[in-house]
Image: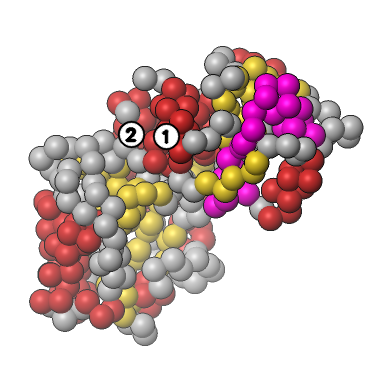
Amino acid sequence: MKRTERLLKKMEELGLESLFLNNVSNVRYISGYTGADSYILISPKGKWFITDYRYTEQAKKECTEFEVIQRNRQTTTLGQCVNQLLKENNISNMGFERDHISFGMIEDIKNDIENAEIIPTSGIVEGLRYTKDEGEIELVKKACEIADKAFEQLLKIIKVGMTEAEAALELEYFMKKLGAEDVAFDTILISGKKTSMPHGIPSDKKIEYGDFITVDFGALYKGYRSDMTRTFVMGEANEEQVKVYNSVLEAQKAAVAGIKAGITGKEADDKATEILKRDGYYEVSGKSLGHGVGLDIHERPFMNPICQDVLEEGCIVTVEPGVYIPGWGGVRIEDTVVVTKDGCEILTHTPKELLVIK
């Protein structure tokens, strides 16, 4: 069944005669459009892709299921354009994405709608995106492959005295040279005591001998993203570094081994939590195992101590326990995996045993 057909079926179940989409990832998922500044109005009575002269040619090539509406932004507001389509097709209500639209935009649209009821909705397209089809899985696999190869190149050139920012830039260059259209998110490459910050920012801090280095990064490939974290030591690892690292590694492997279709996000998280509690690190852990990945870097399902999202075959998620000790440092180890009926397939293949760069 086509994505548009699945969406229309869901809309029928919810009593929606039409749905307005403005979220970039949702627009792309439903239409195949890879550009920006465009909107969808979809109904059993028609499928309309609303854009302007900058993107009309591209939209006509990519959005073959849709009638492309070229709006003159100087003379026609978005609300007026939508209102005309609703009136011409006798559509009495329209849903909108309340989680993604600004207050100003929806108020402006409402002011131009004459008769149709405007209904807030949440998570309709995201629900369709929850599991990935074979094509999507292949794109995430390619993004993971690019990240693996780029990290391999980074390890060849990273050295004591290089700044975090310099190393991060090299990694991003390697990914783009290998075919990434962009980074999947802002690269995290931090060292020493800064590794206690889960989302620390690369700076002009120089990498020192004995530092933990945490690298959390991903590639964007044809709209889909990878996400991987590796922590390693520059020079020589001390006893405490080895102890913390091995605890996180055991927790990560236990969680990966427990991933399968049918379990909840909480049940997945419990596997890592058990190890970290045993070793006395739970209170300084992230207390969240992972999240879905696809067109967005953070999407459902989520895995944490309270999440009841059920993992399904075809879900793509990260498995990333971490320990973060202020004033000392931290460790995170992360893989991207695709959930299968009886387990999962790991898509990131960089080795996870503690690596020491001499």
Numbered tag placed on residue 132 in the rendering: 2
Q: Position of residue 117 (x, y in %)?
A: 65, 41
User: Which residue is rendered at x = 14% and y = 62% of the image?
Assistant: 271
Is residue 130 or residue 289 the one in the foreground? Answer: 130
- Provide the residue span drawn in magenta: 78-101
Q: Residue 274: name its quadrant.
A: bottom left
Nearest to viewer (mark 1 / mark 2): 1
Left or right position of 63 against 240: right
User: Which residue is rendered at x = 68% and y = 55% of the image?
Assistant: 103
The outermost residue toward the bottom is 327
Image quadrant containing the N terminus: top left
Numbered tag placed on residue 13 in the rendering: 1
* In the image, residue 90 lies in the stretch drawn in magenta: yes
Image quadrant containing the C terminus: bottom left
* In the image, residue 95 lies in the stretch drawn in magenta: yes
Q: Amino acid at mark 1?
A: Glu
Kindly tell me whether residue 308 is visible in this rendering: yes
Q: Residues within 10 Å of mark 1 (few under 14, many from 20)?
A: few
Is residue 20 or residue 190 the one in the foreground? Answer: 20
Is residue 214 or residue 47 the one in the foreground? Answer: 47
User: Which residue is rendered at x = 35% and y = 25% of the image?
Assistant: 135
